[in-house]
Image (spheres, rainbow, N blue to C red):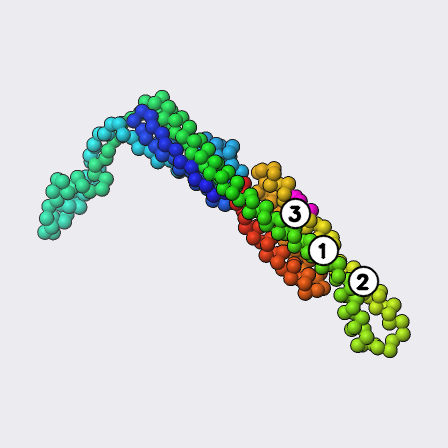
C-alpha cells in the first residue's frame, strides 16, 4: 500500500502543488494539510481518497503561493509602541537609542497585508485545487496498483510453498499412527513385560493416543485456506480478508505442531509457521 502521487496547478495568479503519499495501515486513515484560507479543501480531499482507496495511512499536502500582487506594507503601531517603550527604558540606563531601520526589522512591527480576493475568484481557485488533489490521488492509486501487480507473484509463491508443506505434512501424518503405537508398545514392554493381555491394551491405548494426535483436520483446513487465499487474490480489494486468513493459517499451524508426535512432522510445522509469517508480512501491502 505504499505509493506516491503528485500534481501541479495554477489559476488567477495562484500556483500550487499537491503531493499524496501512503504507507501500510490496517484501515484507511487520511491526513490533510492545506494552505491557509482554503479550509473547504479538507472534506473534499478526504472524500476523494475514500472513493479511491481502502487501506493505508495517506498523507495529502497542498502547498500554494500567490504570484500576482505584492500586498501592502502596514506598521503594527501597537507592537512598535511596545518596542519603543522598552528601548527608551534601556536608553535611560545608558543603552544606545534604537534606529528606525532596526525598529522596522523587529518581528511583528511590519505586516504585509495580502490583497483581498473576490469571493468568486477564491471559490474558482479552491475548485481548481480540489481537481488537482484528485489528480494526485489518481497518481497515488496508479502507483499502488503497480506495486500490487509486482507483489502478486510473490504472494502466490508463498501460498504455493504453504500448499507443498501441507502435502508433505499429510504424507508424514500417515506414518504418525504407527510411530505412536510402536513407541507405546516399547514403553509398555519396559514397564510390564509379563503382563497378560498386553497386546490388546497396547492397541487400545495407541488408538486413543493416535486419535488425540490426528492432524488431518488441521491439514484439511490449511488446504482450504490455501484455496481461499488464491480466490481472494482474484477478487480485490482483499487486504482485510487476507489479514484474517493469516490468523487462521497460523492457528492451524500451531495446532499441528502441538499435536505432532514425530520430529519430521514438527519440522514441517515449524517451517510452515515461518512461511506463513513471511506471507503475513507481504499481505500488509495488499489493498
Q: Residue at x 75, y 61 (%)?
A: 175
As helix, strand or loop, the secondary structure at mark 2 comes to: helix
Q: Which of the 4 quarters of the picture holds residue 117?
A: top left
Numbered circle sitting on residue 170: 1
Numbered circle sitting on residue 226: 3
- The majority secondary structure of the magenta stretch comes to helix
Is residue 284 found left or right of 264 in the rendered image? Answer: left
Q: Residue at x 81, y 65 (%)?
A: 206
Q: Indicate the position of residue 119 as horizontal and vertical percent values.
A: 35, 23
Q: Indicate the position of residue 73 as horizontal and vertical percent values.
A: 20, 32
Q: Is residue 46 visible?
A: no
In the depicted view, which residue is nearer to us: 173 or 33? Answer: 173
Between the residue at mark 2 and the residue at mark 1, the CA separation in whole angstroms equals 20 Å
In the depicted view, which residue is nearer to us: 89 or 169? Answer: 169
Report the span colored magenta.
Answer: 224-228
Name the residue carrying label 2: 208
Between the residue at mark 2 and the residue at mark 3, the CA separation in whole angstroms equals 30 Å
Q: Residue at x 27, y 30 (%)?
A: 67
Instruction: Return the disc, 3 or 1, that comes first in the chain's sequence.
Output: 1
As helix, strand or loop, the secondary structure at mark 1 comes to: helix
Q: Counting other residues with Cα less than 10 Å from the Cα at mark 3, is it few (<14), some (14-19), or many (20 or more)?
A: many
Please check the rendered image and state whether residue 225 is part of the magenta-colored stretch, yes or no.
Answer: yes
Q: Indicate the position of residue 19 as horizontal and vertical percent values.
A: 40, 37
Q: Which of the 4 quarters of the picture holds residue 265?
A: bottom right
Amino acid at each position: 500500500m505504499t505509493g506516491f502521487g503528485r500534481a501541479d496547478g495554477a489559476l488567477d495568479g495562484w500556483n500550487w502543488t499537491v503531493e499524496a503519499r501512503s504507507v501500510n495501515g490496517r484501515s484507511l486513515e487520511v491526513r490533510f494539510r492545506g494552505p491557509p484560507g482554503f479550509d473547504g479543501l479538507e472534506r473534499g480531499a478526504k472524500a476523494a481518497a475514500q472513493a479511491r482507496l481502502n487501506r493505508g495511512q495517506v498523507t495529502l499536502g497542498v502547498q500554494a503561493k500567490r504570484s500576482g500582487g505584492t500586498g501592502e506594507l502596514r506598521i503594527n503601531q501597537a507592537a512598535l509602541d511596545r518596542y519603543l517603550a522598552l528601548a527608551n527604558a534601556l536608553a535611560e540606563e545608558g543603552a544606545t537609542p534604537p534606529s528606525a531601520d532596526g525598529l522596522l526589522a523587529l518581528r511583528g512591527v511590519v505586516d504585509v497585508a495580502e490583497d483581498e480576493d473576490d469571493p468568486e475568484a477564491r471559490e474558482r481557485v479552491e475548485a481548481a485545487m480540489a481537481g488537482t488533489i484528485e489528480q494526485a490521488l489518481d497518481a497515488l492509486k496508479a502507483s499502488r496498483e503497480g506495486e500490487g501487480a509486482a507483489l502478486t507473484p510473490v504472494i502466490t509463491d508463498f501460498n504455493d510453498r504453504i500448499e507443498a508443506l501441507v502435502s508433505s505434512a499429510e504424507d508424514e501424518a500417515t506414518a504418525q499412527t504407527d510411530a505412536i503405537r510402536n513407541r507405546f508398545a516399547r514403553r509398555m514392554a519396559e514397564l510390564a513385560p509379563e503382563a497378560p493381555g498386553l497386546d490388546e491394551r497396547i492397541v487400545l491405548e495407541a488408538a486413543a493416543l493416535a486419535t488425540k494426535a490426528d492432524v488431518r483436520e488441521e491439514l484439511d483446513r490449511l488446504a482450504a485456506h490455501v484455496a481461499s487465499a488464491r480466490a481472494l487474490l482474484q477478487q480485490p480489494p482483499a487486504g482485510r480478508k487476507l489479514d484474517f486468513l493469516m490468523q487462521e493459517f497460523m492457528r492451524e499451524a500451531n495446532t499441528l505442531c502441538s499435536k505432532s508426535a514425530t520430529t519430521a512432522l514438527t519440522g514441517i510445522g515449524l517451517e510452515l509457521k515461518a512461511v506463513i509469517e513471511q506471507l503475513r508480512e507481504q499481505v500488509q501491502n495488499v489493498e
